Amino acid sequence: MRSLLLLLNLSSIPGLIAAGICQPAIDELVHSLDQLYRSDDSYAEMSMQIVTPHWERTLTMKAWSHGIDKTFIRILSPAREAGMASLRIGAEMWNYLPNTGSTVRIPPSMMAGSWMGSDITNNDIVREITYAEDYTYSYTTDTTLTGNQSEGVLYIELFPKSSTAVVWSSIVFAVRTSDTIPLWERYYDSHGDLIKTVTYSNVQEMDNRTIPTQMRVIPADKEGQSTTITWSHAEFNRGLDSSIFSLRNLQSGE
Amino acid sequence: MLLKLAWRNVFRQKRRTILTLLTMTGGFFLSSLSIGWMDGSYSSIIMFFTNNRTGQIQVHCKGYLQSPSIYSTVNDYQAAGVFLDSIPGVRAWAPRIYSGALLAVRPRGAGSGNVFTNSAAASVIGIDPVMEEAASGFSSQIESGEMLSSSAADTSYSATGQIILGKELSIILEASAGDSLVMLTQAADGSSADRMYVIRGIVSTGNANIDRNTCYITLSDAQILFALQGKVHEIAVMTGSLGAVDELTAKISAGLSGENLETDSWKTFAREFYNGMKADEASLKVMIFVIVLVAAMGVLNTILMMVLERRREFGVMKAIGTRPGFIVRMIVLEANIMGIISVIAGGILSTAGLLFLSEHGFAMDPPLDYGGTVFREMIASITPECYWIPAICVIITASTVSFLPALKAAHTKAAKTLRTV
């Protein structure tokens, strides 16, 4: 009887949210944003399209991750970059350059630099922070930050804690109420000026998880520039060999 | 009559005249030396700064100086170069490419492994070894190793290139001439580019800020690496003298106006340096003003003394019917005669002093640091300003400071003065 009541209660929550009757607990919502692409380990195949006013190019790649502290990415195409790879263990990052057969450590001074010419920085790849633990957050109704607010969308403003080393002062998330899938996030500096916008789209089920399979980063200060990552395949929690995240594997070029 | 009288009066009381002459000559001499030293110092700083690095004139794609970008290029730099060669007064020109990169070397004792852990971000400058040598004498700044020469990397993307590191950058990377180095960068077409280099030399430009984050590769290599075939970001133009810079800038600007290019003199592209020097120039002008003021006070004092001592003489002159205007003109003329003698004497002394300072200069201890460029010795230069500015100051001072005492003398009461003095 008690189980039945619990099941009834739980099953009624999405309905209530969808009806706008109540908001979900914000802690759970922020936790769900943290877990959107994360898992104990993951494997993904993706493409990254970089558009600038001067050139446009698409890279395809495979990416492996373990927890939040290990990432390995291998570029598959185009030919000039094929075989290049990035390995991140904790805060350290290494790049393998097949043309010279060398492995180069990325110095701290370049962590804010662009990764593979995209609008994603090395810091974005190595970041180990979570919204739940490294930010304070609240729902926001401030339309200067969110723009016109839509029905069925929740807006959350996150502020980095003093111990969180990031270059922005706040993030605003727009999250679909029905399934807690993010629609977009906007990064603001200390003057309240927009730094970049990240949009999420093309929600699909991959390996029993519902995720936006397209993420676009649009820097606010570079007109006509964007980076779009599209997942074509993803696997979660399949148990990865830890040797993937090693300098030996990085230099194997495979 | 007036001139004759004034001339005789000057030499009547020799001790007083010598005192006034010494004050005026001293003021001329110090002002002249200050101006010569200022002009010489700044000329040598500007020439050192511009000849070693920037050139006196630069040609860029329009907007590059305000917002440097790998995409803002001089597309047909060789045609621009042909035009520059045709202009008299252009001593040399050097094409350059600017970009950024990640540099990495193996840690000491790591043998020939492929892991390059000593890494740093750096500015990469692509230079034409021959043209750069003619323009800035680059090889004279190389501390160890050798100048760049043409290499296989000039024609092949995958070949090993040659690189020169700034001295402080080589210390950060713990690298020396002969070591291998990997460069990772992004080309103008968006692709990632990496290349292996051998460190050919270590350069010390005299500016530690620049040497801390700058490396140099050949222009041809940079054009392949950054996908900028046939293009450069800058043409540095060297002129024979600073005096011709403004005229040459206008001439080059007019000649290249249709090419979406802009031409600027060092006063624009090294604005902070120029403004700093202008501020210093202003403080030196204040110093010259103080020297002139002190000399003027001295002259005023001696002329007032002279008027006081010669009260009886002026009384007699008034008694025999001399008009006050005549006395005023006479005293002012006396001061001007002394002024002219001081200018001649000061001119001779200053020439000797300036000649000495232009040969030997002042050793700067501690050395003067201008935007990271260190100057150890300052020399004077002899320019017309060293003479005409102090000369005008002395003559104007003599005329103005003698005027009030002259008025006082002109209004001497004849009867009272003859009774009491």
Image (cartoon, rainbow, N blue to C red):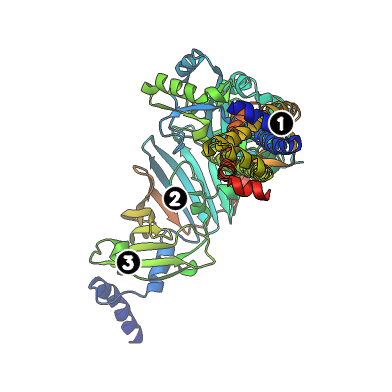
Three-letter code for the amino acid on which mark 1 is drawn: Phe
Three-letter code for the amino acid on which mark 2 is drawn: Ala
Circle 1 residue: B11
Labels 3 and 2 touching (C-beta < 8 A): no
Side of B28 relative to B94 (left or right) = right
Foreground mark, 3 or 1, reads: 1
Query: Where residue B257 sits in the image (x, y, percent)?
Result: 38, 23
Of all residues shown, which one is farthest toward the bottom? A1
Residue at the image position 41 percent from the left and 73 percent from the top = A27
Q: In the structure shown, which secondary structural element does the residue marked by tag 2 occupy?
A: strand
- Do the residues marked 3 and 1 share a common chain? no
Crowd tier of the residue under label 1, counting other residues whose Cα lies within 10 Å: few below 14, some 14–19, many 20 or above: some
Name the residue nearer the viewer: B336 or B165.
B336
Residue at the image position 40 percent from the left and 44 percent from the top = A47
> Chain under label 2?
A
Query: Where residue B115 sits in the image (x, y, percent)?
Result: 66, 41
Number of labels in the image equals 3
Name the residue nearer the viewer: A224 or B82.
B82
Query: Where residue B353 sits in the image (x, y, percent)?
Result: 73, 29
Instruction: Report the disc number at residue A155.
Output: 3
Side of A174 relative to A117 (left or right) = left
Question: Is B228 rendered above or below residue B117?
Answer: above
> Chain under label 3?
A
Foreground mark, 2 or 1, reads: 1
Query: Where residue B397 sits in the image (x, y, percent)?
Result: 59, 38
